[in-house]
Amino acid sequence: MKLIDTHTHLDFPDFDDDRRAVLSHSRQLGVQRMVVLGVYQQNWQRLWDLVQTDDGLFAAFGLHPVYLDEHRPADLMKLGDWLNRLHGHRQLCAVGEIGLDYFLEQLDRERQQSLFEAQLKLAVDFQLPALLHVRRSHAAVIATLKRIRLPRGGIIHAFAGSVEEAREYIKLGFKLGLGGAATWPQALRMHKVLAQLPLEAVVLETDSPDMAPVMYPGQRNSPQHLPDICIALAERMGIDASRLAEASTRNACQLFNWQAADSL
């Protein structure tokens, strides 16, 4: 299987002791490319330095809603500067991780919304996809995306919504990111949704080091786990794992304007 991990945080300190080994083993298992996402201004340089060491790594930069209290007003301008400076670079692939988080009640929703909209507009300005964090906020995110249309769409990371919400995102040009959460037996609602998702709208991800799949409970998640995640999700969807892998890789290549999947 040739796979693309569309959502990782390989720059996090969790991988400092064995990052090269993780990358090497992941490639041996068929994970050809990985998208590494920035979450706050302080980690963008570290992330970019990492991406520059490996042609199969790609960067996205954003201001994550969970770190709302750490973001400064100037960070938005700095994000625009980063995107402008790297515009057209083959390893810059998206704006993200951005979005709305209504699960954490202490996060001010108006401030989140303002930051979210400003970053969506940057994605429009720089003709980039957006990689979205959406937690208990599907209605607000969908409404926002209907007002601020992204020509290149993006990915709804760790999609856990309804079939109806999935259809709305797909109409707006978005792919649905599937990872370890849906492999757990208690994710009954999501299992029903999985079986109804069109393959042309699905991409695979790990969110490593978080969201470990059921076969690695309590462990650090890793791109190395993507093949096992693919197999588990394909079983839930009632299809062959190779078919899911091919569709996900093709969809990711299409979204990011990468070369054809069969040339990876």
Image (spheres, rainbow, N blue to C red):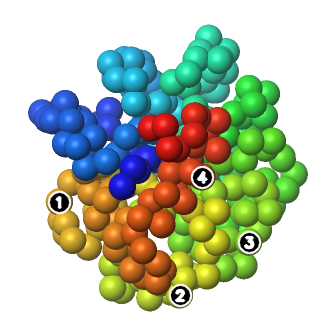
Residue at image position (48%, 66%) is 243
Kind of element beneath mark 1: loop
* Left or right: 228 as drawn, with respect to 64: left
Q: Residues within 10 Å of mark 2 (few under 14, many from 20)?
A: some
**Quarter occupied by the C terminus:** top left
Q: Residues within 10 Å of mark 3 (few under 14, many from 20)?
A: some
Label 3 sits on residue? 167
Looking at the image, tell me whether mark 1 or mark 3 is earlier in sequence order: 3
Query: Could you say where residue 35 lies in the image, as x and y percent from the top left?
Result: 45, 39
* Left or right: 2 as drawn, with respect to 98: left
Please say if the residues under marks 4 and 3 sit with CB atoms less than 8 Å apart. no
Looking at the image, tell me whether mark 3 or mark 2 is earlier in sequence order: 3
Amino acid type shown at disc 4: Asn
* Left or right: 178 as drawn, with respect to 259: left
Kind of element beneath mark 2: helix
Count every numbered label the image shows and give the total.
Answer: 4
Closest to the observer, 134 or 102:
134
Closest to the observer, 235 or 18:
235
Label 4 sits on residue? 251
Residue 69 visible here: no
**Quarter occupied by the N terminus:** bottom left
Residue 47 visible here: yes
Query: Could you say where residue 175 lies in the image, as x and y percent from the top left?
Result: 63, 57
Amino acid type shown at disc 2: Lys
Closest to the observer, 161 or 222:
222
